[in-house]
Image (cartoon, grey):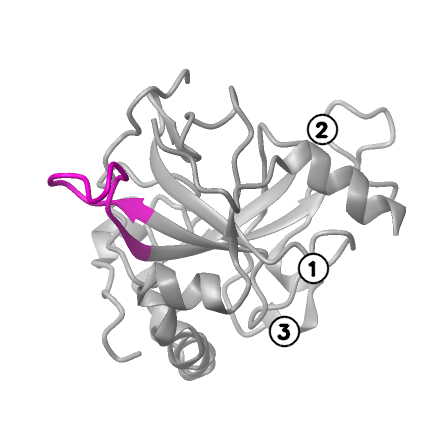
Amino acid sequence: MFQRPGAMPLVVLAFALVGCSSDAPVQAASHLSHENGLSMASLSRATTAQTLSALTALTAPFHSVDAAEAAHYNLFTSVPLTAADGCISSASDGGMGYHYTRGNNLGDDSVSLLDPEFLVYAPKNGPRQDGEARRRLAAFDYFIFYSAKWPGPSDPTFVRAPSTHDFSTMRDLPDVTFAPSRFGGWMFHIWLWEHNPDGTFANWNTAVPLCEGSTF
């Protein structure tokens, strides 16, 4: 599998950091009712719609992977937690895709709505281009490493997972709990550019193709 020169293993990145639109798909109510207790009303509130509209406008230029790379987003890989080309999926839970990060906002214990830790590109069906899987902008991944403030679920000091309402820029969204991840931290996705049958804020997407060579 082809791997971009800019790919960065998350483990290496973690040590480095510690050391130093209207076009968005609309989710049907039946698709949201079972995802963290959300209903269609949760997404149709004026404050939520305005917040997601701002995220739509900010990220629309990144439909092009080349534009994302020009803005210093690099493909993240961490084999065997990702496929060899960086793709992430789960045979039991569904797909995610390729995660691109600037890395400069991964060392803290907070998230900001308009500064996602990762841009997520879903694999496209169809022939590869220059030996590389084609991909389309699908979602954003907000990520917090396990820390003293937000310990992981196996830590004896764990009390609760972070949720969107713990962060000021996300308080206009429904209150959704972050999920533990295989990468040593808490994650929360917004599927703004890709329909997700399980809801806009589900972490996995069963409509996204699974990765080639995925070990999970």
Amino acid carrying label 1: it is: Asn
Q: Badge 1 local density, few (<14 within 10 Å), some, or many (20+)?
A: some
Residue 153, label in figure: 2
Residue 105, label in figure: 1
* Position above or below: 60 against 79: below
* Left or right of 100 in this view: 194: left
Q: Which of the two marks, 3 or 1, is nearer to us in this view?
A: 1
The residues colored magenta run: 122-137
Q: Badge 3 local density, few (<14 within 10 Å), some, or many (20+)?
A: some
Residue 61, label in figure: none
Residue wearing tag 3: 169
Amino acid carrying label 3: it is: Thr
* Position above or below: 159 against 114: above
Which of the image's four quarters has the C terminus? Answer: top left
- SS category of the residue bearing label 1: loop
Residue 162 location in percent, x, y? 68, 49
* Left or right of 164 in this view: 44: left
Residue farthest along the left direction in this orientation:
126
Residue at 20%, 44% in the rendered image: 129
* Left or right of 208 in this view: 12: right
Depth check: give the residue in front, 129 or 153.
129
Magenta: predominant secondary structure element? loop
Distance Cα–Cα, label 3 vs label 1:
15 Å
Q: Badge 2 local density, few (<14 within 10 Å), some, or many (20+)?
A: some
* Position above or below: 168 against 118: below
The answer to which quarter of the image holds residue 138 is bottom left
- SS category of the residue bearing label 2: loop
Residue 85 location in percent, x, y? 40, 32
The answer to which quarter of the image holds residue 92 is top left
- SS category of the residue bearing label 3: helix
Amino acid carrying label 2: it is: Pro
